[in-house]
Image (cartoon, grey):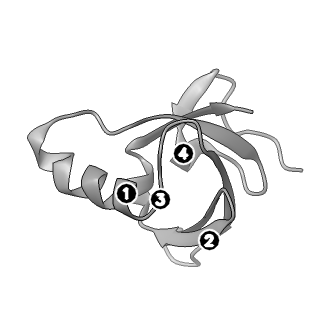
């Protein structure tokens, strides 16, 4: 398994190394500009306390990111992934 790219106990999903697992702590910052993205992330399955894992990143600009959430595999943009706060599991 790859090492985390951050030593902090809580960090953004974009800082999680490939094939590392973490748990979602929170989604979004609550400002008006991100409410649509937060709502979309929740609708497609991102919720607090679910396990996530980065499976793959795109070749150019590392976008999109393939993320496993519980047993689903989803593709999201790095900007959306930066709204998700996780901790090591």
Image quadrant holding the C terminus, namely top right
Furthest-top residue in this view: 9
- Please name the residue that numbered disc 1 is placed on: 41
Q: Element type at marker 4?
A: helix
Q: In the drawing, what numbered circle is on residue 29? A: none
Q: Residue at x 77, y 48 (%)?
A: 20
Q: Element type at marker 1?
A: helix
Q: Is residue 16 above or below residue 76?
A: above
Q: Position of residue 67 (x, y in %)?
A: 60, 63
Q: Position of residue 10 (x, y in %)?
A: 57, 25
Q: Residue at x 10, y 42 (%)?
A: 32
Spatial separation of the CA atoms under disc 4 and disc 2: 15 Å
The answer to whether residue 61 of the structure is visible from this angle is no
Furthest-left residue in this view: 32
Lower position in the chain sequence, tag 4 or tag 1: 4
Determine contact: label 3, label 4, CB under 8 Å: no
- Please name the residue that numbered disc 4 is placed on: 13
- Please name the residue that numbered disc 3 is placed on: 45
Mark 2 crowd level (few <14, some 14–19, many ≥20, 10 Å Cα): some
Q: Is residue 53 above or below residue 50?
A: below
Lower position in the chain sequence, tag 1 or tag 2: 1
Spatial separation of the CA atoms under disc 4 and disc 1: 13 Å
Describe residue 20's horizontal placement relative to residue 80 as left or right: right
Residue 4, quarter of the rendered image:
top right
Lower position in the chain sequence, tag 3 or tag 2: 3
Q: In the drawing, what numbered circle is on residue 73? A: 2
Q: Element type at marker 3?
A: loop
Describe residue 2's horizontal placement relative to residue 21 as left or right: right
Mark 1 crowd level (few <14, some 14–19, many ≥20, 10 Å Cα): some
Describe residue 18's horizontal placement relative to residue 38 as left or right: right
Q: Residue at x 41, y 66 (%)?
A: 77
Q: Residue at x 35, y 61 (%)?
A: 43
């Amino acid at each position: 398994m790859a090492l985390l790219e951050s030593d902090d106990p809580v960090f953004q999903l974009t800082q999680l190394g490939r094939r590392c697992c973490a748990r979602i702590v929170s989604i979004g910052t609550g400002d008006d500009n991100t409410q649509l993205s937060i709502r979309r992330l929740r609708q497609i399955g991102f919720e607090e306390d679910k396990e996530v894992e980065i499976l793959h990143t795109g070749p150019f600009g590392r976008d999109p990111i393939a993320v496993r959430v519980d047993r689903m595999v989803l593709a999201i943009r790095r900007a959306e992934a930066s709204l998700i706060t996780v901790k090591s599991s």
